[in-house]
Structures are given as C-alpha cells and as structure tokens.
Image (spheres, rainbow, N blue to C red):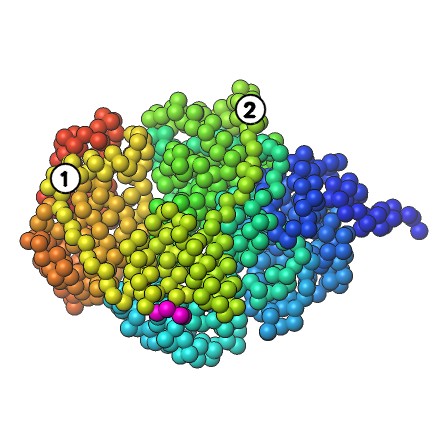
C-alpha cells in the first residue's frame, strides 16, 4: 500500500495552535503563505484569544473567510470546541465550504456529524440555524443544549439583521391571531392614528403602528392567551421559531402592526435563551463595514470592553482598486437612461462614445437594485435579472471568468463574491428599505439622524465591496441615485465610510471635480482610464491608500451599552435599575431624534412600575421626535404661520441646508427620487418628502397625521397667512382600477374637517389628493374643488422644481431672497400657482 504522507502530517496539524503555523502545515493550500494583513490580524487575535468577544475588521477581499477558519481551527487544536462558522444565508455556505476545502481544513454542514461533535471538523451553518426558538443546539427551558466552544460570525452586519428577525415572532394578516390582536388593541391603535387603524382594519396600506406600552401591560394576560394557541403550529414558521424568545415577557414586548403582519419582539434580543451562543468561550465577529460596534453589545450581548478594540491590520491599504463615481453628482442633469445604455455598451465592449462596434474587451457589469420595480428599469439592457434563489449558477459562471454581460441582482448587497473579471463595473441603483414592521417604523422616525445615515452608508459600502476580492483586483463603481451621490459629496456623510473606502472616494472626487457639469462622454473617458489600467492612475491610487490606517477604537455609544444592561436587568426582575441605567444612557445623546426614539423605550420599562411617569416620558419623546408613540394626553398643537414672503422663507431654508450648487441640485432631486408609486413600504417616506418639498419652496410644512393623534392630514402646507393646502397621499395604491375609492375620499374629507377645527385662522383650504387616478368611484364623494396630483402631474411638478433649483445653482443665488422669488414666479411655484398648475381636476 502506498504511503499517504498527508495522514502523517495531519497529526502534527492538530497539535499546532498558532494560526500561521497551522496554515504553513496545511498540505493542500494553493498559495505558499498568508497575506501580510491576514498574518497581522491572526497574530493579534492569538494574543487576545481568551477575550470572549472579538471583532476582526478586514477590508472587503482581504481574506476574512480564511482568517475565520484558521481562528476556529486554532481554537479546536487548543481544546476549545466544538466550532461553528456562521454565515447569513445558505448561498454563502457553499462559498465557505469551498474555501475550507481549497486549503485542506476539515468542515461539515451536518450538526450531527461526529467529527463536529468531537472537535475534528468545523460546522458551517447559517446564523438562523443556531439562533431560533427551536434550535438544534438547544433553547433554555425548551430543548437540551449543545455547548459550543468557538463561534465565528461572518458578515457581522448581516448577522445583526438576522438576530432582529429571529427574535421577532410574526403572524401574517391571514393568520387568525392577527385579527384577534387587532381587535384586542383596536382602541389604543385608534388613539395612535384613527386613519392608520381604519386602514389596518380595512386591509389597506398603513404606516406601521405600535401598540402603546400601557395597553400591552394592561392586557398582557389576554395577549398571552391569544398567542399561546399558536405556539405549536409549525405552519406559522415566523411565529413558531421565535415564540420562545418572547413568551415569558409579553408585558415588556414591542407589538407593531402593518397591513401584512403583526410583530412581537422584546427591546433587545433575548440571546441568553440560546446558551450555546450566549455561553460560548469565544465569539469572533468578522466584518468590513461595521460602523458601530455598539450594536454587537445591544443585539448580541457582546462584552463592551472586548469589542471596543477591534483587531485590524497595521494599514488599511489591503483593498482592491476602485474608481467611485456618482454621475448625477457630477452633472445632476444627466439622463439615467443614458447611463444605463452606457453600462450596456461597456458590457458589449463599446467603450467609446459614438462607436457602433466593440473596440474594447467586453466586461461583466453587475447592477445591485433593492426591488423588482427598480430592476424593471434595467430590463432593456440586462442579460439576466436574478434573485438570491436563482443566482448561484450565474455567479459561478462569472467567478469562473465567463463573460455573461450585464447582470442585475435584486436585493443582494452582501454575501456575493465577484472576483476579478466577474465584475469590472459595479452599479448601485438604490438602497434597500427596512422590511420588518418595527424596522420600518424606526427608519421613518430616525430619518436625518446619524443612525439612519450610517445604516444607509453601510448598505452602500457593502454593495461596493462585491466587485473586489484582493489587493490586485479592480472594479469601477457607479452610484446611480441622488441619495447615494450625496454620501460622496457631503463631508459629514463621507466620514461614515470605512477609512480605505473613504480614501478611494476622496481620490475619485478629485476626478469628479475635473469633469463637473460635463456630459456622459467625460465620465466614459474616466472609466476607460481606470479600466484600461492607466499606469499613472494605478500609481496615484496605490499612493492614496498607502498610509491609510484602520480606526483603532471601536464606536460604542453609551446608549448601546445602556440598552443592553437595562434589558438584562429587566429580565432579571430589577425594573427600577433598568429605568435608571437606560435614563443615564439617554442623557448622553445629543441628537433630538435619537433621544426621542430611546425615550419611547424608557417609557416601556417605566410602564411596569411608574405608569404616570411613562406618560410624561412619552410626551417628552414626542416633543423631540414626532415619529414616536403618542401619549394618552395629547401635546398642544403648534401654531402654523404662513410665509408672508415666500421667497425670503425659501432662501433662508436653502441657505441653512446647502453649501454648494451641486449638493443643492442633488438635494432637490432626491426629494422626488424618494417618492415612489405602488410600493407600500415607501409611503411614509413619500409623506416626508412632501414635507421637505414644502420647506424647500418656502412654505410652512408639517405632517399632522404623524404629529398628532386625532386624524389630521398626511401633509399641510401653509401657502400664505390664510391659505392651506390639505394634502393626502395615496402613492402606495397598486391596483388595476385607479379610481378614487370611498375610503380614500373619506380620508381627505376628514382631513379638511380637521383643518377647519384645528386651524380656523385659515380662510381658504385647497384639498389635494396625491393619487394614481383622477376619476372618482361611484360610491365616493369629494369636494368639487379637489385637486389631484397624478404621476404625470408629479413629473411636471418635478420638472419645474428641478428647473428652479438649476436656475439658483447656476447663478449661485439660492441665498438671495429676490432671486429665489423671481425663480419661484418663473417656474409657477409661487403660492397662488403651485397647486393649481401642478395638479388636475377630478374627472366627472
């Protein structure tokens, strides 16, 4: 029998504990040595390996997977096991298994595999498989626990999203329990929003509505009786697998309704119920883009002192080359259609303007979009439009070096590796919206806060990272939307990117400045310089990254730690301590929106011991952030003053908001970009855009339905001291028959009545309905003077507003009240024309 030297070597490998030594001894590794940055972080990890929670930060494409596998193998060799390597989804299991097989590290996908249980193999699994209320690894009080020694959490940001989902028990509208809970809390939901509750009851779209803490505490027993009937129903998967995480603490739960579902969750994930995770000796979080390590504390119970010092290489120059451009930032008047056409031409090898045949090597172009609706704009140009369920074969072709052309990936911004020729041009066309009920509500409440902006930037950066896999790789990146473009131009938003990405953005912005306000041809030339690897560019790019360092201190806010400690104390039964700890954390917050949001959480704890104090806290929260819960005693309504001089008001607002011409153009454009038709989850965002539009045009602009609890309109513009535009938005309507139905008409009529009652100083009111149709259903009634803003009207409105912005930007006159007034008049945006010119009459 021939000698098998690998078997001889294997015995030695199992005795080595230094990760670099383990790698050196692997018999099948395809390359002789680790990259310098891998060696640096592995040494640092080994020195700190007894800390329970460690964050390893490596730029995208720097070999995080191998680092994670080697830390797991080192732990096993040291006797710390079993070892689990967790990934966000099943697609990534294949990638990690392939990476382990490539270097000769033993792995398995079967949790019953004796090699895993005996510390001879690393289990590769999804985060969901470990963290669920029926976990194979055990749940305290429900199932026998399998102890784990080391857990590697890959793509930590995705694990955090999974944690939020896994610890949320959800019933869909079609489930009986949804209707029972809706009836149980009907009175309280009506108090929060009469219109919102009416929509929920009718099955129409409504912004997410949270049940107030008082109602949950008062009816905790009734809630439990409703929900426990469904705890063993395996058909209700989103409920069955999460129910154990909330069952024992219903009085502390956050219950949020949308038209499609009701979500029951606790203020923080109850990770202690999964002892295999909570008690693991070592938990290692791998990430490239995590901006706030504090969320690991809040969501996963990580030790603050451990994650406060992330493990990083000495330099952040371990990143593939990228040119990052935003065409609409370079020239806000560029046609998005022409940008898409240009992308198609690069995929076909037509790289010069005006050519009809390929003169360059065709490249693979990958486009990331958040939804099928966004993907539809790419249909004329795409070779394939793919989803996570069907993309694997095409990703394999791309990774194998095949030329596929232009590929659109729907809602897949992380967890896909596209090395080298798999993707030379990456386009990000939109940012995913929050999906869960409470996440949607939080996003709406925190628009404009640092937390909201940081999450947006993180999603963009995750998407950017798809196209580079190592320091020798290169990929051009185009950001299509104005929202994304603003993250490159704004110094405040740019600071939210990781250091290496920020350095590449700053270098790319120098390119953008040279071609500012030029046509698409100049952008095409810049892309060609990059893609054809111009030596001067390559040298300049490498120099830009050469001295960039990772941030040595993790960002852990006091509120992140306070929220977790308060939750842990409440679970232990010490509610007084929970209130004290959380209040102290809230006192450290300077941003009013975020402070108001967290005061709402404080009220949930107070309701258990100080009901009157809870109502005062909600009132304070409401004063800081109108997206929070309404107290049972309504705050006084604010007086609205109409602009006596619209141009002066607009100039003052624009001067305070914009510092340069292109940012002003992008800001105006992003308002309309964020008004979508036919998408439920974007309706609240559209309402906010109408509020902002009113302010940009110099009007007093509020959202009464959001701000108060008595059924006001979605928006109210005080056009002049005695004229109001009462605006209801129905942008979410998505049905074949676009006629205005009875309930929609009824809401506008009710809003008019509200305006008469609460703002009697207005002597004239213009009823406005933003709706896809302008005909009235036979059972519906509206005032004859109602104005309808249809998609076509909104497009014309947009044209005039953008022309207004361009005029001010070109003359740099947006701070001059006289110039602003003249432009308002020129484009029919003055108070007595803005509605009538940009809307339609009802069809009769």
Q: Badge 1 is on which residue?
A: 646
Does 341 sit above or below residue 510? below
SS label for mark 1: helix
The percent coordinates of residue 101 (x first, y second) are 72, 48
Q: Give the range drawn in magenta.
A: 607-611
Q: In this view, does 539 lie to the left or right of 584?
A: right
Q: Distance between the residues labelled 2 and 1?
A: 50 Å
Magenta stretch, main secondary structure, is: helix
The percent coordinates of residue 267 (x first, y second) are 45, 62
| Foreground residue among 527 and 326 | 326
Within 10 Å of disc 1 (Cα), the crowding (few <14, some 14-19, many 20+) is many
* Residue at left offset 58%, top offset 44%: 309
Q: In this view, does 327 lie to the left or right of 46?
A: left
Does 710 sit above or below residue 392? below
User: Which badge, 2 or 1, is on the more N-terminal residue?
Assistant: 2
SS label for mark 2: helix
Does 432 sit above or below residue 319? below
Tell me if I can see residue 475 in this picture. no
Q: Badge 2 is on which residue?
A: 543
Q: Quadrant of the C terminus?
A: bottom left
* Residue at left offset 67%, top offset 66%: 146
């Amino acid at each position: 029998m021939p000698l098998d030297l690998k078997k001889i070597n294997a015995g030695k490998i199992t005795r080595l504990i230094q990760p670099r030594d383990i790698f050196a001894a692997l018999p099948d590794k395809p390359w002789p040595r680790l990259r310098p940055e891998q060696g640096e972080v592995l040494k640092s990890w080994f020195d700190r390996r007894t800390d329970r929670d460690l964050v390893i930060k490596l730029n995208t494409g720097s070999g995080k997977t191998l680092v994670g596998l080697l830390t797991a193998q080192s732990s096993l060799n040291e006797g710390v096991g079993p070892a689990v390597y967790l990934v966000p989804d099943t697609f990534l299991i294949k990638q990690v298994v392939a990476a382990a097989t490539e270097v000769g590290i033993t792995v398995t996908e079967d949790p019953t595999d004796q090699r895993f249980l005996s510390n001879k193999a690393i289990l590769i699994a999804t985060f969901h498989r470990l963290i669920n209320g029926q976990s194979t690894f055990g749940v305290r009080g429900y199932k026998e626990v399998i102890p784990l020694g080391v857990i590697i959490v890959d793509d930590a940001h995705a694990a955090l999203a999974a944690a939020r989902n896994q610890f949320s028990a959800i019933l869909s509208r079609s489930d009986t329990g949804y209707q029972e809970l809706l009836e149980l809390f009907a009175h309280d939901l009506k108090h929060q929003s009469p219109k919102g509750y009416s929509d929920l009851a009718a099955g129409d779209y409504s912004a997410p509505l949270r049940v107030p803490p008082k109602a949950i505490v008062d009816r905790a027993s009734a809630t439990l009786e409703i929900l426990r009937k469904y705890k063993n129903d395996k058909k209700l998967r989103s409920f069955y697998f999460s129910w154990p995480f909330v069952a024992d603490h219903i009085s502390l739960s956050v219950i949020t309704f949308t038209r499609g579902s009701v979500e029951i969750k606790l203020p923080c994930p109850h990770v202690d119920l999964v002892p295999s995770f909570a008690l693991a000796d070592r938990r290692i979080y791998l990430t490239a883009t995590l901006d706030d390590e504090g969320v690991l504390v809040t969501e996963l119970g990580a030790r603050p002192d451990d994650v406060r010092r992330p493990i990083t290489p000495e330099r952040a120059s371990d990143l593939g080359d990228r040119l990052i451009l935003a065409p609409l930032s370079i020239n806000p008047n560029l046609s998005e259609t022409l940008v898409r056409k240009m992308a198609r031409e690069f995929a076909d090898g037509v790289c010069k303007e005006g050519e009809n045949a390929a003169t360059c090597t065709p490249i693979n172009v990958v486009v990331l979009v958040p939804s099928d609706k966004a993907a539809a704009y790419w249909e004329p140009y795409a070779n394939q439009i793919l989803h996570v369920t069907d993309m694997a074969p095409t990703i394999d072709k791309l990774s194998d070096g095949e030329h596929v052309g232009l590929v659109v990936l729907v809602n897949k911004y992380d967890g896909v590796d596209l090395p080298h020729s798999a993707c030379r041009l990456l386009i990000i066309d939109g940012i995913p919206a929050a999906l869960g009920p409470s996440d949607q509500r939080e996003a709406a409440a925190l628009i404009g806060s640092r937390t909201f902006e940081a999450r947006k930037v993180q999603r963009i950066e995750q998407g950017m990272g798809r196209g580079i896999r190592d320091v020798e790789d290169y990929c051009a990146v185009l950001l299509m939307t104005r929202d994304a473009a603003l993250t490159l131009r704004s110094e405040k938003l740019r600071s939210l990117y990781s250091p290496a990405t920020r350095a590449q953005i700053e270098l790319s912005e120098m390119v953008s400045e040279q071609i500012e306000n030029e046509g698409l041809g100049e952008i095409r030339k810049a892309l060609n310089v990059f893609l054809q690897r111009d030596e001067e560019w390559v040298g300049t790019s490498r120099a830009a990254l050469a001295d960039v360092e990772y941030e040595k201190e993790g960002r852990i806010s006091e509120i992140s730690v306070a929220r977790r400690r308060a939750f842990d104390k409440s679970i232990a039964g010490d509610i007084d301590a929970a209130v004290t700890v959380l209040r102290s954390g809230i006192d450290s917050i300077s941003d009013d929106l975020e402070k108001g949001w967290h005061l709402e959480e404080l009220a949930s704890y107070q309701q258990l011991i100080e009901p009157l104090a809870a109502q005062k806290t909600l009132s304070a929260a409401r004063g800081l952030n109108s997206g929070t819960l309404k107290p049972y005693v309504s705050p006084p309504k604010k007086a609205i003053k109409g602009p006596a001089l619209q141009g002066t008001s607009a100039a003052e607002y624009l001067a305070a908001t914009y510092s340069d011409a292109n940012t002003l153009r992008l800001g105006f454009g992003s308002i309309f970009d964020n008004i979508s038709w036919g998408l439920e989850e974007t309706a609240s965002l559209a309402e906010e855009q109408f509020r902002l539009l009113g302010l940009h045009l110099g009007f007093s602009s509020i959202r009464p339905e959001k701000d108060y609890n008595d059924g006001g309109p979605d928006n109210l513009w005080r056009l002049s001291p005695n004229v109001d535009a009462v605006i209801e938005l129905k942008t979410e309507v998505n049905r074949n028959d676009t006629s205005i139905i009875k309930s929609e008409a009824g809401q506008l009529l009710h809003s008019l009545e509200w305006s008469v009652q609460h703002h009697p100083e207005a002597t004239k009111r213009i009823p406005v309905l933003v709706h896809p149709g302008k005909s009235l259903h036979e059972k519906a009634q509206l005032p004859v003077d109602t104005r309808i803003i249809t998609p076509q009207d909104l497009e014309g409105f947009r044209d005039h507003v953008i022309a207004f912005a361009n005029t001010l930007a070109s003359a740099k006159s947006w701070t001059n009240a006289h110039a602003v007034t003249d432009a308002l008049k020129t484009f029919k945006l003055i108070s007595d024309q803005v509605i009538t010119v940009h809307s339609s009459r009802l069809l009769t």
